[in-house]
């Protein structure tokens, strides 16, 4: 047990150093201007490490006060991470004005539904409610990232390499946190150590991805596409859909002709 | 390990699958940063070859030939006709893909898109792909006897006139749009 605790402390030290390194890298490469919310998240995360270290030094680990401070700071960190995820979505899609308006709506609705559904699995007591709330937020972020990638694929939008790697880090971290929170909720009393260890390992992997993504200075403003005049979409889109529908009908009649006699 | 845990495990696994799938395909051709090349594909269509396919699948042809040739040759003919149907299916798919790409690029480059139109297109895509795969599977497995392929020719006949008309109309529209897009005073947003 003491060995596990030592290992966890070493890991904590490593992640804290890497987090500090990430903040330094962001500033030195001037990437804090390109990704302001991501930089804010990295900074808040670093500050949370310092606050938690001090709290656990002063207060008893697992006491009501330390839990309150831990979850309070975690809420701030999670919210800044949500802003960082939104920033990635904005950077990728905002230059495509029409698609961005459509995607923004879908992303918000999907994230809201996912968060509410995850919250619905809450068990009733306050610790479970906190875990469920956190899980809901993490699942909403993971879903938003997946939707962003699906949108980029569907509309053939180019994803910047840095955005792709940053989003991958967020997705991995959020995905693991969803599972960790669920595991912790089920085995609430005796799995805190394991939960923290898994969380730290996942965060370490994400940190390494983010450092890799931001090792170079990023372009502050991505080139904007030359847009079509407004009325082209209005006049051609229904026509294309009608054509797609007729192709579909053709296929369904083909299917009907096949199915009728088999 | 509870039901809740497995539920979330499945959700995360599904999200991971979609995530990997969407990551894998980002190497594809991306939206052009100029609108002038968007619409030129719009006028080409595999459906223009429908008259030849109709002739190849005409039931009268089959009836006539079945009286003149050996069963072996008839079997060979059946195989070839099935191949024609499969090729036609592939052509439909190719045309669908080309139209979808045009529609997507146009949406991406439009300052305003309609949610209804986009959702409808997503629905059409899912519906088309499902039917396409099922029809192809049935044809490949040889479950379609010749009379059914003859039915197909009737289907094609009834649709071809409408399709060719629609394509001509679309081509004219696209030509007008392409002309407007390439004119020097079009609205454009300059790169920052």
Image (cartoon, coloured by chain):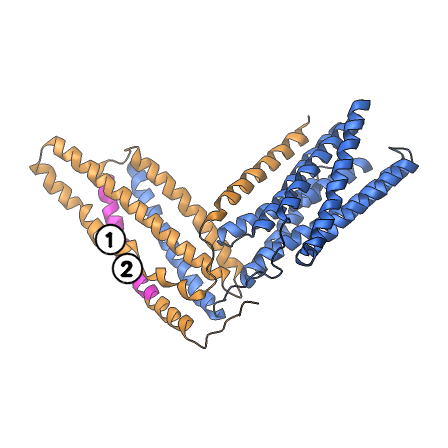
Chain colours: A blue, B orange
State which chain disc 1 sits on: B
Quadrant location, the N terminus of chain B:
top right
Q: Which residues are magenta?
A: B148-171
Which residue is pictured at 81% across the width and 46% down the height? A47
Q: Which residue is mark 2?
A: B164
Secondary structure under the numbered disc 1 in the rendered image = helix
Residue drawn at (36%, 68%), measured in percent from left and top?
A: B173
Is residue B119 rendered to the left or right of residue B60? right
Q: Any mark on residue B163, and which?
A: none
Residue B165, position as x, y percentages in the image: 29, 62
Q: Earlier in the sequence, mark 1 or mark 2?
A: 1
Q: CA distance from mark 1 to mark 2?
A: 9 Å
Is A224 positioned to the left or the right of B126 in the image? right
Q: Residue furthest left?
A: B68
**Is residue A129 one of those drawn in magenta?**
no
Question: Residues at badges 1 and 2 in contact (C-beta under 8 Å)?
Answer: yes
Give how far across and how far down residue A166 sits, in percent. 63, 47
């Amino acid at each position: 047990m003491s060995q596990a605790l030592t290992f966890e402390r070493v890991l904590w030290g490593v992640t804290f150093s890497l987090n500090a390194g990430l903040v330094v890298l962001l500033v030195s490469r001037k990437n804090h201007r390109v990704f302001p919310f991501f930089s804010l998240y990295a900074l808040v995360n670093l500050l949370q490490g310092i606050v938690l270290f001090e709290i656990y030094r002063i207060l008893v680990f697992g006491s009501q006060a330390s839990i309150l401070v831990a979850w309070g700071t975690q809420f701030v960190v999670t919210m800044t991470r949500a802003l960082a995820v939104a920033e990635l979505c904005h950077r990728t899609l905002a230059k495509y004005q029409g698609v961005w308006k459509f995607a923004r709506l879908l992303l918000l609705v999907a994230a809201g539904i996912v968060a509410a559904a995850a919250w619905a699995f809450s068990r009733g007591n306050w610790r479970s409610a906190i875990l469920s709330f956190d899980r809901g937020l993490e699942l909403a972020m993971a879903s938003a990232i997946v939707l962003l990638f699906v949108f980029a694929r569907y509309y053939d939008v180019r994803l910047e390499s840095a955005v792709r790697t940053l989003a991958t880090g967020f997705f991995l971290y959020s995905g693991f946190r969803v599972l960790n929170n669920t595991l912790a909720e089920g085995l609430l009393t005796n799995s805190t150590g394991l939960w923290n260890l898994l969380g730290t390992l996942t965060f370490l992997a994400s940190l390494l991805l983010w450092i890799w993504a931001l090792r170079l200075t990023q372009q502050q403003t991505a080139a904007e596409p030359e847009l079509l005049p407004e009325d082209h979409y209005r006049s051609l889109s229904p026509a294309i859909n009608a054509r797609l529908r007729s192709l579909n009908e053709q296929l369904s009649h083909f299917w009907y002709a096949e199915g009728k006699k088999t | 390990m509870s039901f809740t845990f497995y539920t979330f495990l499945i959700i995360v696994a599904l999200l991971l699958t979609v995530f990997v799938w969407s990551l894998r395909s980002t190497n594809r051709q991306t939206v052009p940063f100029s609108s002038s090349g968007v619409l030129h594909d719009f006028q080409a269509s595999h459906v223009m070859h429908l008259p030849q396919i109709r002739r190849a699948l005409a039931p009268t042809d089959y009836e006539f030939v079945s009286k003149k040739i050996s069963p072996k040759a008839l079997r060979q003919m059946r195989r070839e006709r099935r191949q024609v149907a499969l090729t036609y299916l592939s052509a439909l798919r190719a045309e669908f893909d080309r139209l979808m790409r045009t529609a997507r690029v146009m949406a991406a480059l439009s300052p305003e898109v309609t949610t209804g139109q986009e959702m409808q297109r997503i629905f059409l895509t899912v519906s088309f792909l499902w039917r396409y795969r099922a029809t192809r599977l049935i044809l490949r497995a040889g479950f379609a006897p010749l009379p059914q392929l003859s039915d197909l020719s009737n289907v094609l006949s009834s649709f071809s006139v409408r399709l060719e008309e629609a394509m001509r109309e679309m081509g004219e529209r696209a030509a007008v749009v392409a002309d407007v897009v390439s004119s020097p005073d079009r609205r454009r947003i300059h790169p920052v």
